[in-house]
Image (cartoon, helix red, strand yellow):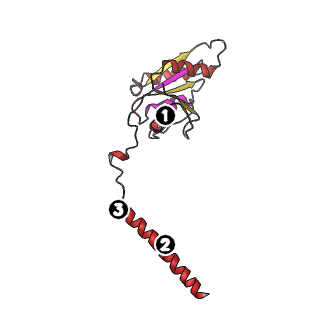
């Protein structure tokens, strides 16, 4: 029986050593991730419209918009919709829209009345989508905090056409290619 264990151990050792040798010989060098083919940014940079409907969000809207304006993606716009707010949400959005960092990126829409047969948030989203210039629409809530370097728009290279997108950093999003 001792010979059996000795032979089995030697065979397992040989198999293990051959696997290690194959792995070592099969990897001639470590990949240089500084080369262009490893760049994970969007290659075609389609225009993205980020739509933020907000109603009575004075506590969150300023930080949310600051973070959206600081995204590391270059070809995007942010459309902030003040949806009949009774607090300072509209004032905060308007003040941010006048700031230098928002120039050319932040659009403001103010909704004063809700048409009949419409529900508030869906009307705000529809109104913003009608004014959006992006190839893709990204809907998010006013209390969602984005990371500027989150590479949020990398899915544009992966997802063809229309797809629901679930992202950890957003409550929900619907991407739409026009």
**Disc on the earlier residue, 2 or 3:** 2
Q: Where's residue 66, x and y in %?
A: 47, 31
Find numbered disc 3 in the image and state the secondary structure of the residue it sits on.
loop
* Along the line of sight, the residue nearer the viewer: 31 or 34: 31
Q: Where's residue 56, x and y in %?
A: 60, 24
Dot 1 alpha-carbon crowd within 10 angstroms: few under 14, some 14 to 19, many 20 or more: few
* Along the line of sight, the residue nearer the viewer: 58 or 132: 132
Q: Write down the region rendered in magenta.
A: 59-83
Check whether the beta carbons of the residues at disc 1 and disc 3 lie within 8 A of each other.
no
Q: Which residue is mark 3?
A: 28
Distance from disc 2 to disc 3, alpha carbons, whole Å, reads 20 Å
Q: Residue at x 51, y 78 (%)?
A: 11
In the image, residue 125 lies in the stretch drawn in magenta = no
Q: Which residue is mark 1?
A: 160
Residue 85 visible (yes or no): no
Q: Which mark is residue 16?
A: 2
């Amino acid at each position: 029986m001792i010979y059996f264990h000795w032979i089995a151990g030697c065979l397992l050792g040989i198999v293990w050593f051959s696997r290690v040798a194959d792995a070592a010989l099969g990897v001639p060098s470590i990949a240089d991730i500084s080369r262009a083919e490893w760049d994970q940014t969007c290659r075609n940079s389609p225009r993205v419209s980020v739509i933020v409907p907000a109603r009575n969000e004075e506590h969150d809207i300023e930080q949310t918009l600051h973070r959206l304006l600081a995204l590391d993606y270059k070809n995007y716009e942010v459309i902030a919709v003040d949806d009949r707010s009774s607090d300072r949400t509209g004032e905060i959005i308007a003040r941010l829209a006048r700031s230098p960092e928002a120039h050319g990126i932040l659009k403001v829409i103010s909704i004063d009345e809700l048409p009949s047969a419409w529900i508030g948030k869906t009307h705000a989203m529809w109104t913003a989508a009608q004014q959006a210039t992006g190839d893709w629409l990204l809907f998010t809530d006013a209390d969602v905090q984005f990371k500027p370097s989150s590479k949020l728009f990398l899915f544009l290279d992966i997802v063809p056409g229309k797809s629901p997108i679930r992202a950890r950093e957003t409550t929900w999003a619907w991407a739409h290619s026009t």
